[in-house]
């Protein structure tokens, strides 16, 4: 009887252990995540009668992303009074959300009189150690869950006077196509030279502590 009890317990423990391991593995592998590509460079580009901060994104999965929204925050380092302190400012977007994300999406922050970037030069942003942090949130129709992705641009990753070039094309059947490799391409308006810049998906960690 004791041997039968031990054998039954071992069989039950084995089945339960296998079920738990399978559940953990499935939960890890099936965890939904966004795969959004970001232009490698952000632009200070002409906008209406002034300028704007712009970057471009593309959905690199076939999954439909519903009601995506973007939040843009500027981080600067204030070194007044001999101390270093981080300041965080939310930047107003021309269009903070859209209905669907089937192709590309250009995020635009108008640099008007109310913008913390108004009147700032490239040297000013370098002195402030400026970093632009992005959080994108959307509903993934395939997984029926909300997915997130974050990214950032440092002051050294800005292109002044650039303008994004079209990233679309038409195939032989007349269907519209997105050229992912051109999502980050831009033209320098002063020279007319087109710069080919790729797309990246790597999320950035929080900025390191400011150095005095």
Image (spheres, grey):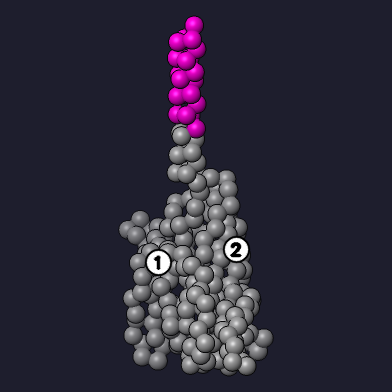
Look at mark 1 in the image and give the residue it sits on: 200
The reply to whether discs 2 and 1 touch (Cβ–Cβ < 8 Å) is: no
Q: Residue at x 39, y 60 (%)?
A: 177
120 on left or right of 38: right
Q: Badge 1: few (under 14), some or many (20 or more) residues near its Cα, within 10 Å?
A: some
Q: Residue at x 35, y 67 (%)?
A: 181
Q: Residue at x 42, y 64 (%)?
A: 202
Q: Badge 2: few (under 14), some or many (20 or more) residues near its Cα, within 10 Å?
A: some
Q: Is residue 203 magenta?
A: no
Q: Nearer the viewer, residue 111 or 147?
A: 147
Callout 1 secondary element: strand
User: From which residue to which does the magenta span run?
Assistant: 1-20
Mark 2 / mark 1, whichever is N-terminal: 2
Callout 2 secondary element: strand
Q: Report the disc number at residue 69.
A: 2
Residue furthest out toward the front: 2
What is the C-alpha distance between the residues marked 2 and 1? 19 Å
Location of residue 138 by image quarter: bottom right
Q: Report the disc number at residue 190.
A: none
Q: Is residue 6 magenta?
A: yes
Q: Nearer the viewer, residue 176 or 68?
A: 68
């Amino acid at each position: 009887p004791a041997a039968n009890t031990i054998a039954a317990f071992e069989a039950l423990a084995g089945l339960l252990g296998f079920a738990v391991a399978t559940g953990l593995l499935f939960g890890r592998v099936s965890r939904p995540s966004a795969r959004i590509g970001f232009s490698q460079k952000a632009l200070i580009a002409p906008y209406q009668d002034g300028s704007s901060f712009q970057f471009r994104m593309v959905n690199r999965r076939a999954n439909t992303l519903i009601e995506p929204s973007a939040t843009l925050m500027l981080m600067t380092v204030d070194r007044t009074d001999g101390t270093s302190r981080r300041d965080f400012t939310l930047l107003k977007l021309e269009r903070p959300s859209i209905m669907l994300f089937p192709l590309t999406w250009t995020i635009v922050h108008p640099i008007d009189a109310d913008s913390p970037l108004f009147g700032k030069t490239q040297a000013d942003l370098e002195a402030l150690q400026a970093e632009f942090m992005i959080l994108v949130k959307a509903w993934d129709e395939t997984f029926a869950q909300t997915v997130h992705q974050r990214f950032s641009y440092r002051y050294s990753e800005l292109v002044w006077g650039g303008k994004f070039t079209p990233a679309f094309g038409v195939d032989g059947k007349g269907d519209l196509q997105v050229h992912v490799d051109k999502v980050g391409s831009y033209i320098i308006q002063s020279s007319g030279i087109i710069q080919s810049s790729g797309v990246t998906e790597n999320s950035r960690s929080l900025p390191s502590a400011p150095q005095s």
